[in-house]
Image (cartoon, rainbow, N blue to C red):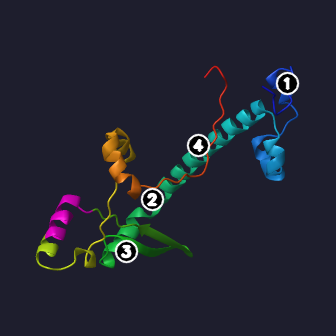
């Protein structure tokens, strides 16, 4: 099999002495990055994962500090406004702190199905009140007998998402 990129017999560490580092990627074109040898791409991918984890840890710490500093004040303000969720604003030495506490709503699917049947039995259209969605988990679909899958095939479409590439050394 032909190798799309030239390789050398130099040790990996020596090859990386004078090569781009993760922080240099901004100044390189996509083509220049794509033309790098696989071992350098692997090293850069590992650096990217490490940096992403580091930034996430720092962001989590910073957000915890903001919650510690402003959590009580924003809860007092939210309560004063008669809210249990949503956005409130408080001021701290000329800085406006905007705190959002999103509302998460979940619905009991079995009870909603029963309500839809009651609405239908009363002669009304349940879709005037409810959004009704049907889903088939792909794992279940794959486990069905062929005859069952054939019956559902016309209702199923398949698309792909963004490709993801992961590099590893052979010994992993």
* Discs 3/4, front: 4
For the residues labelled 1 and 4, the Cα–Cα distance comes to 27 Å
Tally of marks: 4
Q: Which of marks 3 and 1 precedes in the sequence? A: 1
Residue 15 spot, x, y in % from top left: 85, 27
Q: Which residues are magenta?
A: 107-117
3 and 4 marks in contact (CB < 8 Å): no
> Which residue carries the number 4 mark?
53
Secondary structure mostly taken by the magenta-highlighted segment of the chain:
helix
Residue 58 spot, x, y in % from top left: 57, 48
Q: Say which of 132 and 70 sits in front.
A: 132
Residue 35 spot, x, y in % from top left: 83, 40
> Which residue carries the number 1 mark?
14
- Residues packed near mark 2 inside 10 Å, few (<14), some (14 to 19) or many (20 plus): some
Residue 67: image tag: 2
* Discs 1/3, front: 1
Q: Secondary structure at mark 3?
A: helix
For the residues labelled 2 and 3, the Cα–Cα distance comes to 14 Å
Quarter occupied by residue 109: bottom left
Q: Which of marks 4 and 2 precedes in the sequence? A: 4
For the residues labelled 2 and 1, the Cα–Cα distance comes to 46 Å
> Which residue carries the number 3 mark?
77
Q: Which of marks 4 and 3 precedes in the sequence? A: 4
Answer left or right for 63 relative to 143: right
- Residues packed near mark 1 inside 10 Å, few (<14), some (14 to 19) or many (20 plus): few
Q: Which of marks 3 and 2 precedes in the sequence? A: 2
Q: Secondary structure at mark 1?
A: helix
**Quadrant (top left, top right, bottom left, bottom right) of the C terminus:** top right
Q: Secondary structure at mark 2?
A: helix
Q: Which of marks 1 and 2 precedes in the sequence? A: 1
């Amino acid at each position: 099999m032909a190798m799309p990129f030239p390789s050398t017999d130099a040790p990996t560490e020596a090859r990386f002495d004078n090569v781009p580092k993760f922080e240099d990627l901004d100044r390189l074109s996509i083509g220049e990055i794509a033309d790098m040898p696989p071992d350098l791409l692997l090293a850069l991918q590992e650096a990217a994962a490490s940096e992403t984890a580091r930034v996430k840890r720092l962001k989590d710490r910073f957000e915890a500090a903001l919650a510690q500093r402003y959590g009580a004040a924003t809860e007092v303000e939210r309560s004063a406004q008669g809210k249990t969720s949503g956005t409130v604003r408080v001021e701290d030495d000329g800085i406006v702190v905007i705190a959002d506490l999103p509302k998460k709503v979940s619905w009991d699917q079995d009870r909603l199905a029963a309500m839809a049947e009651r609405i239908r039995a009363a002669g009304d259209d349940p879709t005037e009140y409810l959004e009704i969605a049907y889903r088939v988990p792909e794992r279940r679909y794959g486990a069905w007998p062929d005859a069952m899958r054939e019956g559902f095939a016309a209702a199923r479409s398949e698309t792909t998402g963004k490709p993801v590439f992961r590099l590893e050394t052979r010994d992993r």
